[in-house]
Amino acid sequence: MYQRRNLSEELKHQLKNGTMTNRIVIANVVVFLFIHTFLAIGRMSDKDLFPLIDVIFTLNTSWKEFLMMPWGVFTSIFTHFDLYHIFFNMIFLYFAGNMFERFFSGKKLLLVYIFGGLLGGVSEILNTTLFSSVYEAHHVIGASGSVMAIFTALAFYSPNTKVHLFGILPVRLFLLALFFLATDLIGIGKEGDNIAHFAHLGGAFFGFLAVQNINTSKNVIFQIERLQEKIKNLFKKKPKMYYTRSDQHKTDEQYNFDKRKKQEKTDLILDKISKSGYDSLTKEEKDFLFNQSKNG
């Protein structure tokens, strides 16, 4: 049954219970609205706040600038300045992301989105560094590299899956992937198109890697997840260990649980003594009571 929710309630619901695709879309839209609200406040107070936004949310492809502001390689994949830019990226992300989640998990989608975008950003930096005579350092923003990673992963995993362009024309995924790849290759080196083609290609390459050896420990996503667990374990608080006479190490929880169980058993034996006398105890109960009094 459909439950009516206002906008605030719906956002909370989607962030808590929605698909990973919806959460990533919301994150992009929130960043977009924050940036333009911040810039609007600056205009109303007659201050140019764009340089601050530029430092926080864009990736500078000069390797020297990148070393000074490395966070840009991450923040830029959630950043859009132009309404049409975010609109088309989010439409593409919504359909590709939901399809990806039908094959894989939401966690894998997030990893492909993030690391596809990161590799896309690094590709732009490498391109600017290696071909500095042709490409000047520039700023990169947008989720395009991340979206290309997701789409390419789908195209290599299930190439013959059909999608309907404009809801009408059935096209196989691998044909769309070839079209987008050709578009980026043709666009390389063209002046004035303002498209980060190497970010797209870097993202596409990660998407290709993401579905190789998919069900083995060699898979790149599996390796990333394992690295995450190792890092997480480094920061986990190690439980206190108790050394018991039985040469066993116990955590706080185990120790307290055993202590509580022993106390309950002791209380039952003492209650039995008060009702029927000490002689009514079994040999096991007498031994247990003796050991408890000795340990106490």
Image (cartoon, grey):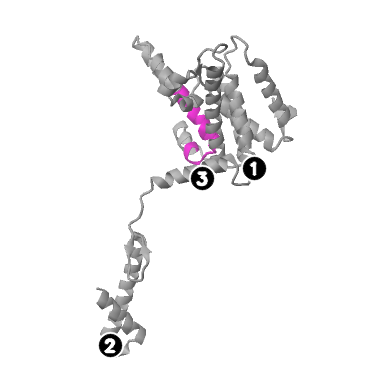
Along the line of sight, the residue nearer the viewer: 153 or 81: 153
Identify the residue position indicated by label 1 in the image: 213
Principal SS element in the magenta part?
helix
Question: Marks 3/2: CA distance?
Answer: 58 Å
Q: Which circle, 3 or 2, is nearer the viewer?
A: 3
* Quarter of the figure that contains the C terminus: bottom left
* Nearer-N-terminus badge (1/2): 1
Identify the residue position indicated by label 3 in the image: 226
Residue visible at 63% across and 36% down in the picture: 99
Q: Which residues are magenta?
A: 14-33
Q: Is residue 228 above or below residue 170?
A: below
Residue visible at 26% across and 84% down in the picture: 274
Q: Is residue 184 magenta?
A: no
* Nearer-N-terminus badge (3/2): 3
Residue most toward the bottom? 279
Q: Give the class, few, some or many, for how many residues have Cα within 10 Å of label 2's Cα (few <14, many ≥20).
A: some
The amino acid type found where label 2 is placed reads: Tyr
* Nearer-N-terminus badge (1/3): 1
Label placed on residue 278: 2
Circle 1 sits in a helix, a strand or a loop, which is it? loop
Residue 261, quarter of the rendered image: bottom left
Q: Is residue 60 above or below residue 295?
A: above
- Horizontally, residue 197 falls left or right of residue 50, namely right
Residue 212 on image: x %, y %: 64, 39
Residue visible at 71% across and 26% down in the picture: 178
Label placed on residue 138: none
Question: Quick check: can you spot residue 67?
Answer: yes
